[in-house]
Amino acid sequence: MNFPIADLHCDLLSFLAAVPRADAFSKDQIACAFPWLQEGGVKMQVMAIYTNVDASSMKMAGKQAKIFYDLLRKEEKTVRKFDAEFLKSETSDERIGIIASVENAAGLGTEKATWPEIYKQFDSMLTTVGQLAYISLTHHTENRFGGGNYVEGVGLKEDGKRLLDYMAGKKIPIDLSHTSDLLAEGILNHIDRHNLPIPVIASHSNFRVLWNHKRNLTDEFAKEIINRGGIIGVNFLRAFLDPEVPERLFEHILHGSKLSEDAICFGADFFYTKNFPDKSRHPFYFPLAENAGKYPSILESISQSLSGSQLRKLASENVFNFYQKLWS
């Protein structure tokens, strides 16, 4: 199955920013190294600017934005910018289209940052990386903007509302993959109450009806994303699929396709795992989805359940159509 692949989430930038002697071309170091992406037929890759919630988050986000900028300049034989121009010519260019995103808005504003500092950081990041694929307000924990996946009872805070207001009209989707349910509800309500032109997606999330985990979407939220014209990227991490059953990945894909064949896509979530302290999480990925070279075999495995048209939509068409519509 050699369909071009679009993927909504990897952590190559934080790997390059934080790991000594990190090499974007080393297949041994990270599952989304450029050779793996090329082997898997990846034509478009979102690269997250990921930060923790701490005093250094804005500095770390700026460092990753600069790395992204440098990749486009220094590795122009391998990558190019994923933008409206790319969408016109993607079939004639062998390079991988890359675009940055913000995973955890702590990278836009520390807990003590003033709003002028946050606006300056936001604008500076856009200047450095160009368009953003999406912004997630939180990661797993709580920050000044709202509550993350693993936080109970914390929804959208006043600073979260203010950041959404600043995003409005900039053609940057809001990502629900790392929200608490209360935060997701608050985001949707705030967008609707103020009629904000902000698309809604889930960049790397699975389905809670299949595996009951806080990182996974309820069908209610999945349908809300679909009804708003958004897309949902299936995550490859064992912990969010079912840690014991490799084939559950296919079930999540097929469930998403049943909800909407025009919304489901990939959000593999490949990151640097070698320094991860919780050994119970190792290995992070099943062999059938352990690196970005596995996309063709994943599509082959579900080819009896989905038509050629549905496979093409899953592989990249849904992502390309979403951004084409957003940027037109």
Image (cartoon, rainbow, N blue to C red):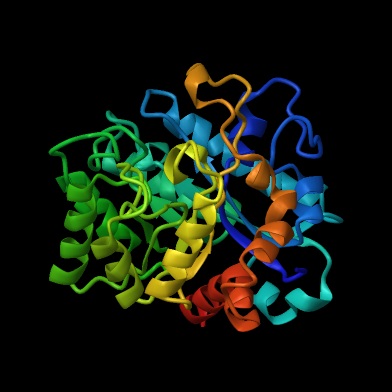
Q: Is residue 199 left or right of residue 5?
A: left
Find residue 202 and report its image quarter: bottom left
Q: Quadrant of the N terminus?
A: bottom right
Q: Position of residue 300 (x, y in %)?
A: 70, 65
Q: Residue at x 77, y 69 (%)?
A: 2
Residue 133 in view: no
Q: Position of residue 20 (x, y in %)?
A: 70, 20
Q: Is residue 92 left or right of residue 240?
A: right
Q: Position of residue 131 (x, y in %)?
A: 54, 62
Q: Is residue 157 above or below residue 256?
A: above
Q: Is residue 139 above or below residue 304?
A: above
Q: Is residue 276 above or below residue 327?
A: above
Q: Is residue 29 left or right of residue 17?
A: right
Q: Residue at x 75, y 79 (%)?
A: 89
Closer-to-camera residue (194/31)? 31
Find residue 121 and report its image quarter: top left
User: Residue lying furthest right in this view?
Assistant: 77
Q: Is residue 108 above or below residue 205?
A: above
Find residue 222 and report its image quarter: bottom left
Q: Is residue 284 left or right of residue 149?
A: right
Q: Number of numbered discs present?
A: 0
Closer-to-camera residue (293/139)? 293
Q: Position of residue 189 (x, y in %)?
A: 15, 63
Q: Residue at x 23, y 39 (%)?
A: 147
Residue 221 in view: yes
Closer-to-camera residue (275/56)? 275
Closer-to-camera residue (201/282)? 282
